[in-house]
Image (cartoon, rainbow, N blue to C red):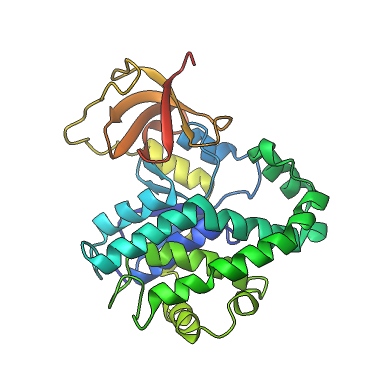
């Protein structure tokens, strides 16, 4: 196992995006602290750290908080460079482009298919919570079930294409996995939880062998950690110094220290609040402070997140 680096992951076992990160931690042979966050709102111990970000997973290193699984993998790869991942070659670029497709479209179809397949067995609080996350979807048990035949057809057409891209390679990234391999794994892992991976992708043994190869990475060594201890860790730490801290004006006249709202693209009802510390083409960093956490810096990737003045 790698040397302990104070990695705290806020997650829950059934979360597909959390599985992406857990598998990456396994690949890195990491030791990490596991904080189990509630599946549904309210999540007071998480949102006080994040300024309102409610999704799982969240990575915490001291009083630096990282949101969005793509950014989390990039930060983990920075602090845990060994073993390396595939970067800077055509296979890695292809894998990472597929990951963008997964995040933008394919995973949503998979999630709707999984939930629709078990619509009558889902806890009501989960249905209500996910409906609140996606008010435009009119998510009821009946509506979820109605979509299943179409989603099954769509996925049966889309998913075998991954096998064609993989071809005879060990990983989508080539001889070693790229960041994109872990995003792609997530969709098949979720389908596998309801035994629908093989029925949707019959044959295509290369894809099933890749999945088994990825699965062997495990999740590293996790140590149970309480939410209270995570808040205490934040309060007893200071955010890392930001090298070349800067705020680009964007379309709005934004400035350092300004109160802003960050929200995921297409989810403007989900709002994260804080003081703008850093904004460039790669990263958004907000500052928040409370008696429970002390000063924390909350990091978001620039892509797929919008920044607006708080008055908006």
* Left or right: 161, with 276 as reference point: right
Quadrant in which residue 24 is drawn: bottom left
Is the residue 67 above or below the residue 149 in the image?
A: above
Q: Is residue 271 above or below residue 310?
A: below
Q: Position of residue 122 (x, y in %)?
A: 77, 56
Residue at (37, 41) in percent of width and height? 303
Q: Position of residue 107 (x, y in %)?
A: 55, 57
Q: Nearer the viewer, residue 99 or 232?
A: 99
Viewer-side residue, 234 vs 245 = 245
Q: In the displayed structure, does residue 120 sit left or right of residue 70?
A: right
The percent coordinates of residue 285 (x first, y second) are: 33, 33
Assign the N terminus to one quadrant of the image.
Answer: bottom left
The residue sitting at the left extreme is 244
Q: How many marks?
A: 0
Up the image or down, 273 lies above or below 233; here it is above
- Residue 122 visible, this angle: no
Above or below 206: residue 32: above
* Residue 180 appears left or right of 143: left
- Name which residue lies at 38% across and 62% down: 180
| Quadrant of residue 301 within the rendered picture | top left
Question: x and y percent of residue 304 in the render?
Answer: 42, 40
Residue 129 can be seen, yes or no? yes
Q: Quadrant of residue 87?
A: bottom left
Q: Who's the residue at 42% across and 31% down the image?
A: 306
């Amino acid at each position: 196992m790698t040397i302990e680096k104070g990695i705290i992951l806020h997650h829950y076992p059934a979360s597909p995006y959390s599985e992406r990160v857990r598998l990456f931690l396994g690949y890195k042979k990491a030791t990490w602290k596991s904080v189990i966050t509630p599946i549904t709102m309210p999540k007071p111990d998480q949102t006080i750290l994040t300024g309102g970000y409610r999704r799982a997973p969240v990575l915490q290193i001291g009083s630096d908080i990282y949101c969005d699984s793509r950014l989390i993998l990039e930060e983990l790869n920075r602090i845990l460079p060994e073993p390396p991942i595939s970067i800077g070659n055509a296979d890695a670029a292809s894998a990472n482009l597929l990951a963008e497709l997964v995040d933008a479209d394919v995973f949503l179809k998979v999630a709707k298919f999984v939930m629709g397949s078990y619509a009558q067995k889902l806890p009501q609080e989960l249905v209500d919570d996910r409906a609140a996350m996606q008010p435009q979807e009119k998510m009821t048990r009946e509506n979820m079930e109605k979509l299943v035949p179409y989603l099954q057809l769509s996925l049966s057409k889309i998913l075998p294409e991954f096998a064609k891209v993989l071809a005879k390679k060990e990983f989508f990234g080539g001889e070693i996995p790229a960041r994109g391999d872990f995003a792609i794994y997530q969709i098949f892992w979720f389908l596998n939880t309801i035994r629908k991976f093989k029925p949707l992708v019959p044959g295509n043994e290369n894809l099933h062998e890749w999945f088994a190869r990825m699965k062997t990475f495990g999740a590293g060594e996790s140590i149970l950690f309480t939410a209270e201890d995570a808040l205490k860790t934040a309060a007893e730490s200071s955010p890392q110094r930001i090298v070349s801290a800067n705020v680009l004006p964007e379309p709005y006249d934004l400035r350092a220290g300004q109160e802003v709202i960050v929200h995921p693209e297409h989810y403007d009802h989900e709002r994260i609040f804080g003081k703008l510390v850093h904004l460039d083409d790669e990263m958004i960093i907000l500052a928040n402070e409370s008696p429970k956490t002390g000063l924390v810096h909350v990091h978001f990737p620039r892509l797929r997140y919008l920044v607006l003045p708080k008055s908006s």
